[in-house]
Image (tube, grey):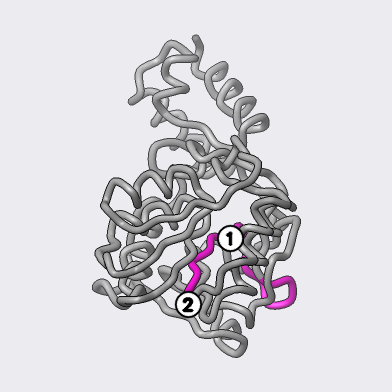
Amino acid sequence: MLHQERHEKILEQLKIKHAVKVNTLAKELGASESTIRRDINELDNLGLLKRVFGGAVSITGNIASEVTDVAERVLLNVKEKDRIAQYAATLISDNDFVFIDAGTTTEKMIDYIENRNVTYVTNGIVHAQKLVQKGFNVFIIGGSLRPMTEAAVGSAAIESIKQYNFTKCFMGANGVDIERGFTTPDISEAAIKAEAIRRSHVSYVLVDHEKFGRVSSVTFAGIEDASIVTNRAENPQYRQYTSIKEVDLEYGGRK
């Protein structure tokens, strides 16, 4: 396949999926992974896509209505999410009753959790499995399973959450905006997030720096309803509305 044809195919895939992996493109286009990486670098330099760890994502504006699946979202800002997850895990204390939202950063957080004298509740299938494997006391929310994000959602899930009173919850978000608050693309997942925050004494939203100023389709909480854990917050205005922990400063400066 010619150089230009590969570029066109990569951009076509991004229009459909919004995110692509190097190894998947290499198989589909019959090229080596090193060739695909060079193609992605060239397209990134031309401003036609954004290069990320392990692949690429489409260029979008501030309104982010697209939904990507878990395999695609896990490619985004890997190092930043890891630092955020590591710090968030330290916020859990003995005797806490914790809700962990389905999401890639909250899933990574489980790798760093050490507290066994805690009860964990989640609507994430993979999250529940990882917590059980570590020997923790775990409850999983019942409801309809959403394949795109591997999360339990729906009216049964919301009713299940209503019986609990959490000391803390840890949530993911697709966007953070001063006026629109915390947002996500899916209505059913937004309802779960909103109810979990209402049932929590303290709420944390885990987001990387690129989520600031972005607005997705559905608001699940106002910016004042939760503290933010991020790798860095470049706009000081957000601190007027909620508390923010910048973990780049916690783990050796900005990278």
Magenta stretch holds residue 116:
no
Along the viewing direction, whichever of 230 and 99 lies nearer the viewer: 99
**Quarter of image, res 250:** bottom left
Q: Residues within 10 Å of mark 1 (few under 14, many from 20)?
A: many
Along the viewing direction, whichever of 128 and 147 lies nearer the viewer: 128
User: Total label count?
Assistant: 2
Q: Quadrant of the C terminus?
A: bottom left
SS for dot 2: strand
Q: Are marks 2 and 1 in contact (CB under 8 Å)?
A: no
> Residue 177, image x and y in percent?
66, 71
Looking at this view, name the residue that lies furthest to the bottom: 240
Q: Relative to 134, does residue 165 appear above or below in the rendering?
A: below
> Residue 75, image x and y in percent?
44, 43
Residue lying at 53% horizontally and 75% vertically, measured from the top left: 203
Magenta stretch holds residue 170:
yes
SS for dot 1: loop
Most common secondary structure along the magenta stretch: strand
Along the viewing direction, whichever of 34 and 27 lies nearer the viewer: 27
Residue range highlighted in magenta: 167-181
> Residue 5, image x and y in percent?
57, 16
Location of mark 1 (residue)? 173
Q: Amino acid at mark 1?
A: Ala
Q: In the drawing, what numbered circle is on residue 167?
A: 2
Along the viewing direction, whichever of 50 and 219 lies nearer the viewer: 219
Instruction: Say which of marks 2 and 1 sits in front.
Output: 2
> Residue 80, image x and y in percent?
38, 59
Residue lying at 51% horizontally and 40% vertically, measured from the top left: 70
Residue lying at 24% horizontally and 73% vertically, measured from the top left: 252
Q: Relative to 214, does residue 9 appear above or below in the rendering?
A: above
Q: Is residue 192 left or right of residue 246?
A: right
